[in-house]
């Protein structure tokens, strides 16, 4: 076979690239399958993860928790082939976030190599200007400057060659047009990567241009060993994610604040105060009545009613029995400000501070209706008829008692 002898539908390079892509997308097991095609899932390292314990390639499993899809990298080759236990599981959310740090390090390394080339160019140009400005009569000085210039040029050539080699190793075999587009987007890479309109499949394809494979070891911490295109390696140590029970657990400072507020407010008022202060739940949602009640029960906090009873406050029935009045009278005294009341729940039910023992003259009078309110006259008789207030001079000895028309309860009053 002699490539390029006859014109083809596609170039030889495109044909080889297609064959390589078909081999990677093979569905069977074996060494022919390396990475698999980029799919729609959010796992960025799908097809690029190796188990750090057994060396097999790890698969991806997705779980849905709280309306979010979270990936998990699973080494299950031994389980599939030999019915053994799963080798290890690694949470994918932590590892995928670490890939952003790797990408930043790659960009930093490329910038350092570029600065090295620019420094060599500056030194070579400086040596050239010194050689040109020297007096030709000074042969020794001119020869020394020419030798220094040649040395700087050799350093520049070596730096440029190394930079080109490293850049070439990190490139994928793609056509010139795609390479130009990729290089033009390099400066805007963070904006493209964080663009919500970019699908996970496209992010995976971008990541495969930079990363050959990733080895994971799940121990006390998660160790990530990244092998980049061209042979360079990066190693990261990541903390394991907290269990969901600890993530959902209310922070101790919030619990302490709720315990303090319950001395003065009911559950609904506590929720409103926390929301005004900018406090949020673990799901970044505002507090409400049910959440405060759940926290109070989970942490064994005393409710508002128990706290008020411990301070000696009485119910309406208890205080009415103590003062030998009806419960409606207690409510009236509270509205008039004679009794200090404290709300203990969200239905506006209250407890009252106990009244001190008073004599009958200091004790609040029991309200009576106007129909049963008897007006006592000067003569000692009383009636239940509605009439205007008596004359101020009624109490004097000279003034005669007024005559009332009509018939009173004890007869006509003279």
Image (spheres, rainbow, N blue to C red):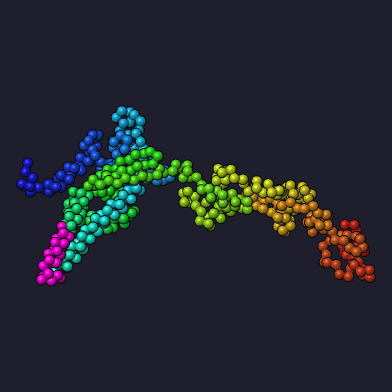
- Above or below, 375 relative to 299: below
Q: Position of residue 104 (x, y in %)?
A: 31, 53
The one nearer the camera, 200 or 142, is 142
Q: Quadrant of residue 90?
A: top left
Q: Quadrant of residue 128?
A: bottom left
* Magenta span: 133-154
Task: Using the rendered image of the protein, determine whether residue 348 is visible from the camera's viewpoint.
Answer: no
- Above or below, 55 relative to 169: above
The one nearer the camera, 82 or 401, is 82
Q: Quadrant where the N terminus lies?
A: top left
Q: Position of residue 177 (x, y in %)?
A: 18, 55
- Above or below, 116 relative to 300: below
Q: Quadrant where the C terminus lies?
A: bottom right
233 on left or right of 258:
left
Q: Residue at x 23, y 34 (%)?
A: 30
The one nearer the camera, 274 or 87, is 87
Q: Residue at x 10, y 71 (%)?
A: 137
291 on left or right of 108:
right
Q: Quadrant of residue 116?
A: bottom left
Task: Using the rendered image of the protein, determine whether residue 135 is visible from the camera's viewpoint.
Answer: yes
409 on left or right of 174:
right
Q: Residue at x 30, y 41 (%)?
A: 215
């Amino acid at each position: 076979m002699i490539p390029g002898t006859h014109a083809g539908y596609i170039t030889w390079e495109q044909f080889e690239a297609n064959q390589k892509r078909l081999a990677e997308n093979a569905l069977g097991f074996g060494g022919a399958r390396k990475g698999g095609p980029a799919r729609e899932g959010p796992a960025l390292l799908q097809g690029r993860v190796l188990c750090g314990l057994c060396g097999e390639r790890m698969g991806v499993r997705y779980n849905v928790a709280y309306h979010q899809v979270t990936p998990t990298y699973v080494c299950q080759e031994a389980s599939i082939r030999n019915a053994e236990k799963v080798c290890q599981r690694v949470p994918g959310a932590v590892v995928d976030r670490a890939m952003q740090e790797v990408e930043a390090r790659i960009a930093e390394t490329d910038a350092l190599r570029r600065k090295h080339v620019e420094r060599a160019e500056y030194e070579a140009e400086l040596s050239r200007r010194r050689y040109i400005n020297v007096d030709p009569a000074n042969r020794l000085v001119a020869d020394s400057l020419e030798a220094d210039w040649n040395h700087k040029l050799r350093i520049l050539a070596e730096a440029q060659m190394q930079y080109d080699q490293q850049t070439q190793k990190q490139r994928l075999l793609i056509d010139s047009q795609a390479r130009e587009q990729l290089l033009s987007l390099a400066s805007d890479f963070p904006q493209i990567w964080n663009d919500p309109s970019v699908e996970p499949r496209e992010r995976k394809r971008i990541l495969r241009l930079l990363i050959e494979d990733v080895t994971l070891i799940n121990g006390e911490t998660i160790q990530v060993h990244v092998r980049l295109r061209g042979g360079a390696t990066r190693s990261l140590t990541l903390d394991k994610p907290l269990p969901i029970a600890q993530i959902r657990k209310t922070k101790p400072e919030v619990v302490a604040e709720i315990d303090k507020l319950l001395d003065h407010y009911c559950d609904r008022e506590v929720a409103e105060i926390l929301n005004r202060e900018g406090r949020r739940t673990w799901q970044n949602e505002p507090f409400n009545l049910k959440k405060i009640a759940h926290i109070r029960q989970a942490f064994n906090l005393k409710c508002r009613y128990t706290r008020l009873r411990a301070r000696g406050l009485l119910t309406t029935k208890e205080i009415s029995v103590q003062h030998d009045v009806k419960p409606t009278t207690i409510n009236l005294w509270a509205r008039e400000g004679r009794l200090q009341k404290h709300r203990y729940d969200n239905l506006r039910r209250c407890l009252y501070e106990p009244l001190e023992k008073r004599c009958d003259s200091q004790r609040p009078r029991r309200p009576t209706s106007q129909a049963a309110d008897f007006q006592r006259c000067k003569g000692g008789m009383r009636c239940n008829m509605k009439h205007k207030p008596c004359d101020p001079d009624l109490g004097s000895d000279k003034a005669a008692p007024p005559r009332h028309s009509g018939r009173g309860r004890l007869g006509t009053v003279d």
